[in-house]
Image (spheres, rainbow, N blue to C red):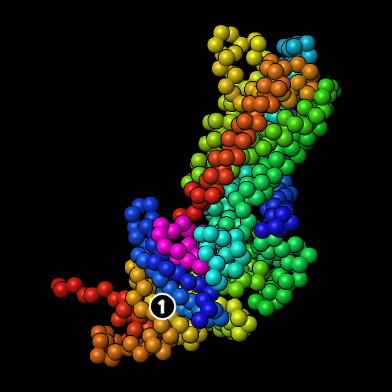
Amino acid sequence: MTSYEQWISFYTIVRKDVVRMLRIWPQTFLPAIVTSALYFLVFGAFMGSRIGTIEGVPYIMFIVPGLVMMQAVMNSYTNVAFVMFQSKFFNRNIDEILVSPTPPWVLIAGFVAGGVLRGVVTALLVLLVALVFTPLAIFNGFIIALFLILASVIFALGGLTNGVFAKSMDAINIVPTFVLQPLVYLGGVFYSAKTLPGIWGEVTMIDPIFYLVNGFRYGFIGKSDVSVWLAIGVLCALAALLFAVVLYLLRTGLGLRQ
Amino acid sequence: MELALDIQNLQKKYADGTPALQGVSLQVPKGDFYALLGPNGAGKTTLIGIATGLVNKTGGSFKIDGIDFDAHPEKARRKVGVVPQNLNVDFFGKVIDIVVNQGGYYGIPRSVALPRAEALLTAVGLSDKRTTQARQLSGGMQRRLMIARALIHEPDLLFLDEPTAGVDIEMRRSMWDYLKTLTARGVTILLTTHYLEEAEQLAKHVAIINKGTIVADGTMDEILARYDEAQQQHKGYRGSRLEEVFLQLTREPEKPS
């Protein structure tokens, strides 16, 4: 395929996903808005007033980046995992792409771009909801955008791996509930790692979401538990590793071709 | 003779050890209407799956229009269209989008794919359903949608895996009439079907596959010439000559009671 044809194929995959997302917006965008509003209300407005400040900023302002990141991560992951699983398991229309000359990396890019769009749009919507509860400072807009996109890319790639491998709907649902949510809650969304006792501070360091949340939070309040450059390095390495895994799966057909 | 499909010693063993294809060789001439017949589980769908890149082979090789699939998969895929046995459309997608999107996966811009899709939908009798969701179509209409989808990139070789299963007689006839116009335009068709009278009327060449092995192939006349009245075992219902030859070649020998 020429570069132009690859672009057409990429655009087609993304367009199809966007049409799907918009068709079922009460399932794709609304839940994140409602859930986040509840978090801001309970943890921010009600409990936050008793907690006071963390790292010198009001508690609600401290948790906003983490909650936005949580929705970006969850949405980019589930979007790609579900679309891939549905198209390979229920109606098998993934074959439409597999029979075509579309190279595996274009397929990955298309699916991941769909996940990134869902993650980023959801994050922006949640940020708008946050503005109802608290004013937001922006310390570095570039860092905010970089971490938001990095998070969406990483978890879209993770979702694609899960979607390709999964043999049942349970395998799709288990990961967000039993893997992602613990990682999110233990990744410093609601607290600073500096406040953790003993070994827990070091355990947090192996949670990739810790780097995402901290880097993203740095973009807002200018403070982070870890070096932003270290966070960028860890996350880029993780993205590269996941891309290599998915590319291997698609090239060999593992999980997709018999 | 130029070949649209040249399969040499194709083998497939599934992960559970089931041998689906055991050294199949098959030559489909360009422009032919070729019927691949066999009982359930004979290996027909596996063969089509391999030839369209949806199933990994475990041995052998094949060329599509002279292009080695292993060496140039992208080039070879451009030549092929497939209508699978099972309905595999996005049931919530609109009919026109399904066809146009398929063009997109072949690198065809929407501005080119749209008029092409309109013409194809008209040809298969679905132009009035263009904005209908696929799930709202009848089974026969969904099969015709899959034919339109398979043709959007103007393939030279079209695989039809039991395209008329569950389709009523009138719709089946109109489908065959349309497909015959394709072969008249030079498109090669490889068809699998359990309706042997269809194959007898339409196909120039036939191969019969059983348990992953080709047990007979040749022109339709050559296959029909194998009909042997003396071998008839059933005294009741009698099918067409092709049906009787098919049964003679694929029937399990009766075990002594």
How many numbered callouts?
1
Q: Chain of mark 1?
A: B
Q: Quadrant of the C terminus of chain B?
A: bottom left
Does residue A107 show up? yes
Residue in the picture at 62% in, 30% down = A237
Determine if the magenta segment contains residue B52. Answer: yes
Q: For residue B176, which quarter of the picture?
A: bottom right
Q: Residues within 10 Å of mark 1 (few under 14, many from 20)?
A: many
Residue B161 in the figure: left or right of residue B107: left
**Amino acid under disc 1:** Ala
Residue B33 in the figure: left or right of residue B152: left
* B135 up-or-down from A123: above or below: below
The residue at the far top in this view is A198
Residue in the picture at 63% in, 68% down = B149
* A142 up-or-down from A60: above or below: below
The residue at the far left in this view is B257
Residue in the picture at 38% in, 64% down = B21
Disc 1, SS: strand
**Whole-percent x and y of residue B52?**
53, 64
Q: Identify the residue under disc 1.
A: B207
Camera-side residue of A119 and A206: A206
**Whole-percent x and y of residue B6?**
48, 71
**Whole-percent x and y of residue B92?**
65, 58
Residue B248 in the figure: left or right of residue B75: left
Determine if the magenta segment contains residue A59. Answer: no
Residue in the picture at 33% in, 87% down = B226
**Whole-percent x and y of residue A211?**
66, 23
Camera-side residue of A215 and B2: B2
Q: Which residues are magenta?
A: B42-64
* B146 up-or-down from B247: above or below: above
Does residue B162 show up? no
Q: For residue A186, which quarter of the picture?
A: top right
